[in-house]
Amino acid sequence: MDFASVEYHLSIMLLVTAMVGMGATLTVQEFGDICRAPHGVLSVLIAQIVVTPLLAIALAYLFRLPSGVSFGLLLIAAMPGGLFSNLITYFGRGNVALSITATAVSTLLCLISTSFVLRVYGATYLPDDFAMPVGRILFEIACFLLSPLLLGMAIRRVWPDQAPFVSRNFIRLSAILLGLFVVGAIGSGRIEIASHGWRTPLALLLFGALSMWTGVGVATLFRLSPDDRFTVSIEVQVRNGSLALLLKAALFPAVADVADPIGDGVLYVVLFYAGASLALGAYEACIKRLKWGILYAESRPEKEPA
């Protein structure tokens, strides 16, 4: 059995398990919190949906990236917040409630925002005869992202005591499936790391760093606290790689022994950025915990007078 024949189905399993795990941590109350404190979520949405797609386009132009890599970068920019953003926020002692709420809201909105971004900006990087299957994108998101998310929320509501067990084990299963996906992609030869040189990794790392600073900048405009600024920056930087892998498999299905520069470029970008964003996020969380730098100086406890 070759990787091409299982890529699509493996990406479905990966996304579904991740979304059930995320949903089992959510309640309807998270969405109600937006009305009481909308600025944090609004900061995330502005940075994610409006700014970072333009940032991806600018970097693709400046670095003269190949079409597949450019589309992959745009695909990442069109993704909602990822599951691991909540974990990094927790590790960095940020606003976990804001992180969970922002991830949930951006996930629901991606039904519209993802297809819009890909349709409006993505055609530049695709062949002239390629028709963006907006209906297929909406179907994939609704069936394999939103439905499992709602299922997880239903589990949390009906069996609240079992929800942490479900969430924990589904997230672990998702991580195992991601590992299998990476091994399969590399072993099948779909990813040739050396062929991408230095420009692609540098552009992706720069996109991650600039996404983080975009979140900080927008959050600062809304005068959010240092903890909230950190949370927004992580939400904007860490994206849903599982959904990106599924859409890649749906839009550019792998064919055994057939090279696909666009599809393989997208796959490389998604997998590289998934790891890079987690590393950058963890580094930022360490800085936050240690209260280094000017961003988190306000959160340092004041010394009591002698």
Image (spheres, grey):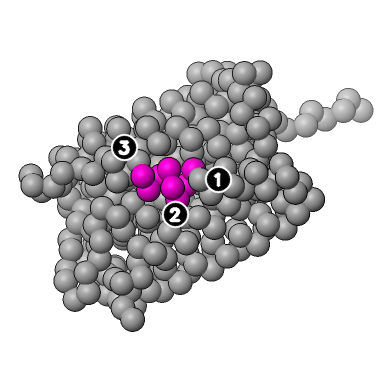
For label 3, count other residues whose C-alpha is less than 10 Å away and answer few (under 14), some (14-19) or many (20+): many
Q: Is residue 52 visible?
A: no
What's the residue at 43%, 43% (across, down)?
A: 142
Q: Which residue is mark 1?
A: 149
Which amino acid type is marked by label 3? Ser
Query: Mark 2 sits on what residue?
Result: 242
Q: Are marks 3 and 1 in contact (CB under 8 Å)?
A: no
Residue at numbered disc 3: 115
The answer to whether residue 133 is above or below residue 246 is: above
Picture layout, residue 11 above or below residue 211: below
Question: Residue at left 23%, top 47%?
Answer: 70
> In which quarter of the view is residue 86 placed?
top right
**Could you tell me residue 170's position as x and y percent?**
61, 60
- The front one of 19 and 188 is 19
Measured from the top left, where is residue 123 in percent x and y?
17, 40
- Badge 2, how many Cα within 10 Å: few under 14, some, many 20+? many
Part of the protein shown in magenta:
139-146
Between marks 2 and 1 in the image, the one whose residue lies nearer the viewer:
1
Query: Which of the image's four quarters has the C terminus?
Result: top right
Q: CA distance from mark 3 to mark 1?
A: 19 Å
Q: Amino acid at mark 2?
A: Ser
Q: Which residue is found at the position 87% from the left and 28% from the top?
A: 304
